[in-house]
Amino acid sequence: MMQIRLARLSAAASIALVTAACGPSGPQGGGGFHGFPPAEVVTLTVAPRSFPVAFEYVGQTLGSKDVEVRARVTGIVEKRLFQEGAFVKAGQQLFTIDPKPYAAQVEQAEAELARAEAQKAQADRESARLKPLAERKAIGQKEADDAASNADFAAAAVKAAKAKVDELKLNWGYTRVLAPISGLTSRAQVSEGSLATTNQTLLTTISQTDPIWVAFTISENEQLRLSRAVAAGQLTVPKDNAYEVTVKLSDGSAFPRKGKINFSDTRVNPTTGTYEVRAELPNADAALKPGQFVRVVLRGAARKDAIAVPQSAVLDGPQGKFVYVAAKDKDGKDIAQPRPVVVGDWVDANGSNLWVVEQGLKPGDVVIVDGIAKLQPGGAIKLPGAGGAAAQPAAGAVPAKPEEANAKSSAPKS
């Protein structure tokens, strides 16, 4: 116990010596925090500007037409006639299902048709022979009417036999499985020798990739936020969703061709709480494949009269995000004062990352954008310029032209 007390007394004495060595702190000592010189900082005088906005979402590519190729007759798969994963044209044969049973059925049906045609010819001759006899009263009218009815029955039988032949020929033709559309095939789901069942067995899938679609979702909260901003006049968006759509690939590169939105759902998915949106892009060289995860960037909106600061100026504190602004203490000296803020979209302006500040700053506020690591709340600072009196904007922090700025809606919100 005695050793513990001695250790505590030694630590307290060390702290006292360090404090004494630093000298007086704060404004009384005429220096910075704990007697250090005032921190040299770079500042930015904020002012409202208009920024083009780009909203970014996670999306997935899919074919503009995705067709499941299924067997339309039952039989043994004899041949696969395409390269899996290759491009096929509409009408190209993909599989052969054993046609011999269907060929035999067609021959049988054609024989039935020939018999029905012979019976019809006989009934027609009988009706033609009895009709004049009935007119001369040589036979009863009923006998002539029966003959005419038999001729009609025979004609109906011929039609039924022809329909049966057509049906069986159609099934015979279905043994040649053809591509319904042009596109990229998936792998074959069955191999030669497998039994295919009518309208059940999936043989392969074909995806039309030109144009290709990109599906993505917008959360209900995000949509409400944008709608309120539009209603308040803070945001303008293209009419009829006429955004310019670009796609970023998984390696960060940009897909060279731009697209447009071709579908936007008006209903919220009750499971995910999101709106479904779909874009369409030209893809003649099949550079995009169905199923890829990409980032979808929508351009064409604009933030009006927004205040933005460099992202490096925004810090995280126990109560949320804040920035340091240059202020005066009671003695008129420059100090760093923390200011809570509510941030919105990210903005890329002239290569500098800015953050739109929704609440907490007003035009004319002087925000500290560099030298923040040395700051303490209420600590003395040295402003740039003669005598440290003038606030200078950080290099590249504010875009020279509004059209050069792009906001990213995927940025985290406070």
Image: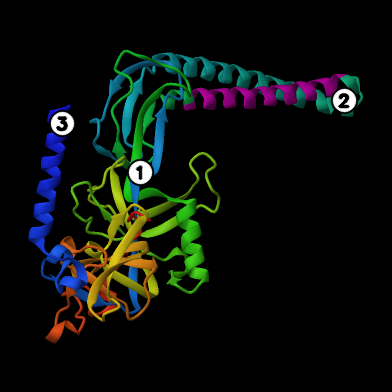
Q: Secondary structure at mark 3?
A: helix
The x, y position of residue 356, in whole percent, is: 34, 67
Q: Secondary structure at mark 1?
A: strand
Callout 2 crowding tier (Cα within 10 Å): few <14, some 14–19, many ≥20: some
Q: Which residue is mark 3?
A: 4
Q: Are marks 1 and 3 in contact (CB under 8 Å)?
A: no
**332 vs 302: above or below:** below
Q: Quadrant of the N terminus?
A: top left
N-terminal of the two: label 1 or label 3? 3
The circle drawn on residue 62 is 1
**240 vs 254: above or below:** below
Pick the residue in front: 331 or 63: 331
Q: Is residue 284 visible?
A: yes
N-terminal of the two: label 1 or label 2? 1
Q: Which residue is mark 2?
A: 134
Q: Residue furthest front?
A: 2
Pick the residue in front: 28 or 150: 28
Q: Amino acid at mark 1?
A: Leu
Q: Which residues are magenta?
A: 143-170
Q: CA distance from mark 1 to mark 2?
A: 74 Å
Callout 1 crowding tier (Cα within 10 Å): few <14, some 14–19, many ≥20: many
Q: Are marks 3 and 2 in contact (CB under 8 Å)?
A: no
Pick the residue in front: 322 or 179: 322
**319 vs 173: above or below:** below
Q: Is residue 138 visible?
A: no
Q: Quadrant of residue 76?
A: top left
